[in-house]
């Protein structure tokens, strides 16, 4: 389901337009090239008939990078069909209406393909740079909840120390929200005290009560300090056991320009058309 939602978000990147009267001169002249890449003016024009300028450039770059990386394009197409069918099943009779809102089924299909290519290239980048990413993010699989009063937090801690399961102890102490396991990193949106526990602890287990002060601003611009009392649990420290979820966290937070820049540099991609160059340079700042 997460992937389907990601695909729908990616649809915002694609819009349909058409142009049937434009002419192309020097059709075979390349506007993008690299090691094994040759994207001509005619290729560009043909794509422009059905897609906007930005999506056309992005798709051309990502598809060629996928080929250069040796991906099985037939396998990618099979994945596209599967994801498309999943969406059809999800939306049922409303599928055509939903697809038309984004430009029709073909545009939807192109968006799914682009989403899958981005995911594969991003995951490959994460895999290639895993050692440095682990040092930077320090991921663990864990849980973190808080109470507004210290008595409830201490009650839960006593239960944990007596061997009661984390979720059950939380409920018995009065915690009413659902508790989910998640990949927690040094960049998670959690208080310093909580992230320090996850970063400094290398063993499965639970924390003591971690007090934190959260500062917010009211409608009049006044600062309000709120005490929160956290209890945390580390479930797993071996990223190999939750790597897919870690990559999802990375994909949501990592600078995508860094990823695409690494591939552009790897294959020495050059853009000869000035407007195309300006767009690529604007989108990927490190591109020269």
Image (cartoon, grey):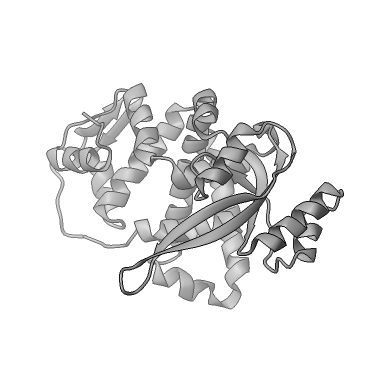
Residue 191 appears at what percent x and percent y? 51, 49
Q: Residue at x 70, y 62 (%)?
A: 151
Q: Residue at x 33, y 44 (%)?
A: 58
Frontmost residue, 178 versus 122: 178
Q: Residue at x 61, y 56 (%)?
A: 229
90 left or right, relative to 62 = right
Q: Quadrant of residue 153?
A: bottom right
Residue 280 appears at what percent x and percent y? 24, 40
Q: Residue at x 65, y 60 (%)?
A: 150
Residue 225 appears at what percent x and percent y? 45, 61
Frontmost residue, 235 versus 201: 201
Visible in this render: residue 75? no
Query: The C terminus lies in which quarter of the figure?
Result: top left
Visible in this render: residue 4? yes
Residue 241 appears at what percent x and percent y? 70, 36
Q: Quadrant of residue 256?
A: top left
């Amino acid at each position: 389901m997460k992937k389907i939602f990601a695909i729908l978000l990616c649809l915002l990147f694609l819009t349909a337009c058409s142009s049937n009267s434009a002419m192309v001169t020097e059709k075979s002249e390349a506007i993008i090239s690299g090691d094994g890449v040759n994207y001509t003016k005619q290729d560009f024009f043909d794509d422009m008939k059905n897609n906007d300028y930005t999506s056309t450039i992005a798709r051309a770059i990502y598809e060629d990078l996928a080929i250069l990386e040796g991906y099985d394009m037939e396998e990618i197409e099979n994945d596209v069909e599967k994801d498309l069918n999943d969406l059809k099943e999800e939306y049922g009779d409303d599928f055509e209406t939903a697809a038309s809102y984004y430009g029709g089924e073909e545009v939807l299909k192109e968006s799914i393909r682009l989403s899958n290519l981005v995911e594969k290239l991003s995951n490959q980048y994460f895999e290639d740079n895993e050692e440095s990413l682990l040092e930077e993010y320090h991921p663990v699989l864990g849980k973190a909840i808080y109470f507004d009063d210290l008595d409830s937090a201490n009650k839960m801690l006593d239960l944990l120390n007596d061997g009661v399961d984390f979720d059950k102890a939380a409920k018995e102490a009065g915690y009413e929200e659902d508790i989910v396991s998640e990949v927690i990193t040094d960049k998670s949106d959690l208080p310093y005290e909580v992230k320090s526990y996850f970063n400094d602890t290398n063993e499965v287990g639970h924390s003591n009560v971690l007090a934190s002060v959260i500062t917010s601003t009211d409608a009049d611009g006044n600062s309000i300090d709120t005490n929160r009392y956290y209890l945390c649990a580390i479930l797993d420290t071996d990223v190999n056991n939750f790597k897919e979820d870690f990559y999802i966290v990375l994909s949501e937070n990592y600078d995508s320009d860094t990823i695409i820049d690494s591939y552009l540099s790897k294959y020495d991609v050059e853009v000869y058309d000035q407007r195309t160059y300006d767009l690529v340079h604007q989108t990927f700042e490190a591109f020269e």
